[in-house]
Amino acid sequence: MTRVLVVEDEPALARALAITLRAKRYDVDVAHTGAAALDAAATRRPDVVVLDLGLPDLDGLDVLRALRGWSAVPVVVLSARHDSSEKVEALDAGADDYVTKPFAVDELLARLRAAVRRGEATGPVPDPVVETARFTVDLPRRRVLLRSAGASDQDDDGEGEPVRLTPTEWQLLAELARSVGRVVGRRELLVALRGPHLGSEAAETHYLRVYVAQLRRKLEADPSAPKHLITEPGVGYRLVP
Amino acid sequence: MTRVLVVEDEPALARALAITLRAKRYDVDVAHTGAAALDAAATRRPDVVVLDLGLPDLDGLDVLRALRGWSAVPVVVLSARHDSSEKVEALDAGADDYVTKPFAVDELLARLRAAVRRGEATGPVPDPVVETARFTVDLPRRRVLLRSAGASDQDDDGEGEPVRLTPTEWQLLAELARSVGRVVGRRELLVALRGPHLGSEAAETHYLRVYVAQLRRKLEADPSAPKHLITEPGVGYRLVP
DNA sequence: CGAACCCGTCAGGAGACCGTCAGGACCGCC
DNA sequence: GGCGGTCCTGACGGTCTCCTGACGGGTTCG
């Protein structure tokens, strides 16, 4: 069944949406705050999200941006404002569609169906937690845990030791984790790290090499013989579990 | 079993409700005052709350607002007044439903079932008390206890020593506690502290740094080597247990 | 066999980022 | 009016991060 997450702080509207959607045979989750929304998105893995921008605890756009840091789930934004500036901002932040309140329920349903179709076209939502034999990349929590290789039989718990990564290191690793198993081209990685304006080819690839090496030093058992951060000569890099 | 908290000062009505609900196989708690209600909501973690607005000690709406500061539990409001202004206020404050007295018991039961269903959709309520190795953040009571590191074997009880926090410090800590384990972006924190209207990027982040430092001074064993109030360079902060 | 190419490693300087201290403005309370 | 507490901003020093340059090993191709 299609699962939809409704992020809406106003109880009355949240309830109305939930009832309507359940009648249409959706599996509905509801979150009233931004924090709960991010949590639910990570644990429940909805196929589509309906996001009201007028949240109490934090700006709805921030929720959207945080979500886009690790998930490609389609998002339909709800807003009371009619000016187009907010609409532009929302779409820039990664919204798939935009509906102004008050809205006709039928219209919302139609846009929802379209968003779901689009989402299905891009394949099922990937697991936001990537595990390898040596470390775990937790996209939603923005953390990477290293399997405690220490001799201790039972350190603290079964999780592992967190690794400190610099922002650039994390962005690079996250980009690879999002396409785990697949080769990621140099250009793709560089755009994620430095933005679309790139310098000379040679200098940029060199930049990548340095940071991949740094990641290997922090994550691989033997940095000179990497098992997970693999080089694809002439193309880019790949993260293999 | 579904647990319901009844907040009702009139003994006769409270008793009648309790009996009716228990007959329907609910697990019922009763509170007669607002203070007791907040306490019970924190310790017993009901799945739904029935709240009478006509309380003796403090305004029922204040109870509702205080509750919403840390919990998303569904609340059905009871009121003797018929004017719609109070109804609007209650719904604005976060009530899920509204029933005017006198009411038919069947109707209340139906609305209660609906509220519970809605609550289940949002997933289990998160723990409103965050514990770390050194201190405890008690969201409902708006308190933070420091583990008595003192040599005394048994200070007063097993709780710990309360720490005095300024309003801003508390809001900051609470915001982190609500997303415990996850990174909380600077923007998010600032919106919670200062509202949505922000100044220059540099000045605002500086403001954050000062208050995080202040919190560390009050909570961390070694403020210069924090173990729980962790900074995520370039992004924000994180509270780790 | 040498040249060209690609990759990985090390090192270092410029700059950004973070933490700390201190002091003035403001507010409520005695 | 004095006073304690809180909020907020400014200045400063230390640390970490980013980025580039130089060098060496391995492989491929002329």
Image (cartoon, coloured by chain):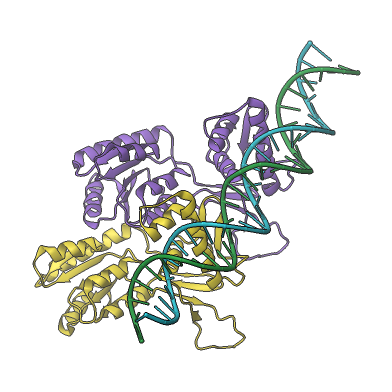
Chain colours: A purple, B yellow, C green, D cyan
How many numbered circles are shown? 0
Residue B80 in percent (x, y) is at: 11, 73
Spot occupied by residue B51 in the image (x, y as percentages of width and height) = 22, 72
Q: Nearer the viewer, residue A65 or A25?
A: A65
Look at 42% across and 45% down and name the residue there: A65
Q: Residue at x 68, y 49 (%)?
A: A218
Whether B168 is drawn above or below D4: the answer is above
Give the residue drawn at x 22%, y 51%.
A19
Point out the image quarter for the N terminus of chain B: bottom left
Q: Residue at x 50, y 54 (%)?
A: B236
In the shown orientation, is residue B105 left or right of residue B215?
left
- Could you say which is closer to the camera, residue A212 or residue C28? C28
Location of residue A228 (image quadrant): top right
Residue B103 seen in the current view:
yes
- Whether residue A112 is visible to the viewer of this picture, yes or no, is no
Choose top left, top right, bottom left or bottom right for residue B7.
bottom left
Q: Is residue B46 left or right of residue B24?
A: right
Return the x and y of residue B204 as percentages of the image width and height: 46, 54
Where, by quadrant of the figure, is residue A148 drawn? Answer: bottom right
* Residue B210: image location, x then y, percent: 51, 62
Say which of A104 and B4 sits in front: A104
Is A214 drawn above or below residue C25 in the view shown?
A: above
